[in-house]
Amino acid sequence: MSGAPPSIELREGGVQDLPSVSRIMQAAFDPAYGEAWTQPQCMGMMALSGVWLLVASIGGRDCGFAMARAMLDEAELLLLATSPAARGQGAGSALLRAVIAESRNRGATKLHLEVRAGNGAIRLYHREGFAKVGERRGYYRGTSGEALDALTLARSLS
């Protein structure tokens, strides 16, 4: 065993990738918080102008995705997920960096995202230069009835 990190391949996704995206999302997002989108929700979003999908794979198997949109000089990371089996292998970082680069290419000067307080992905976002710019108190409702805040993070792309 060489110990070399796995090779992560990124590609532009499309509607044909939604079954794979859905599988990854269902495995990655805790159902207790209702954060996963349905395939029709994803398809509806992808039909909008400025929306794009990236899919990550390791060894030919899809293991993560990111959906984002850009409008005028701002972009938003809508969804980012990696399958639990692929976590810690760099797919999430690669996807996030690709969204940052593509947002710049599309003329955005700022990238926003929203994340549930306590979500482990917050560490990744902070490492990539995102900072908290807002908070929605009690935005998420867990299946237990617990109210959780949503954090709004942003970073400059200039």
Image: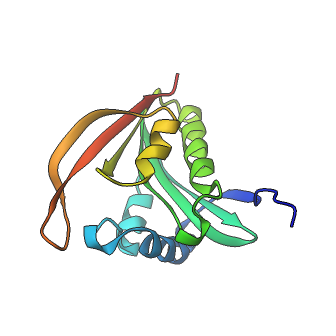
Residue 89's image quarter?
A: bottom right
Q: Quadrant of the N terminus?
A: bottom right
Seen in the image, is 134 located left or right of residue 5?
left
Considering every residue shown, the one lying at the far top of the view is 158
Residue sitting nearer the eye, 82 or 79: 82
Whether residue 4 is visible, yes or no, is yes
Give the image location of residue 103, x and y in percent.
Answer: 53, 37
Give the image location of residue 47, x and y in percent.
Answer: 43, 60
Considering every residue shown, the one lying at the far right of the view is 2
Look at 32% across and 52% down and name the residue there: 118
Look at 42% across and 75% down and name the residue there: 26
Give the image location of residue 42, x and y in percent.
Answer: 40, 66
Indicate whether 53 appears above or below 75: below
Look at 58% across and 71% down and name the residue there: 85
Look at 33% across and 47% down and name the residue there: 114
Residue sitting nearer the eye, 22 or 40: 22
Give the image location of residue 32, x and y in percent.
Answer: 27, 72
Whether residue 49 is visible, yes or no, is no
Seen in the image, is 156 located left or right of residue 37?
right
Seen in the image, is 62 located left or right of residue 83?
right
Indicate whether 147 appears above or below 28: above
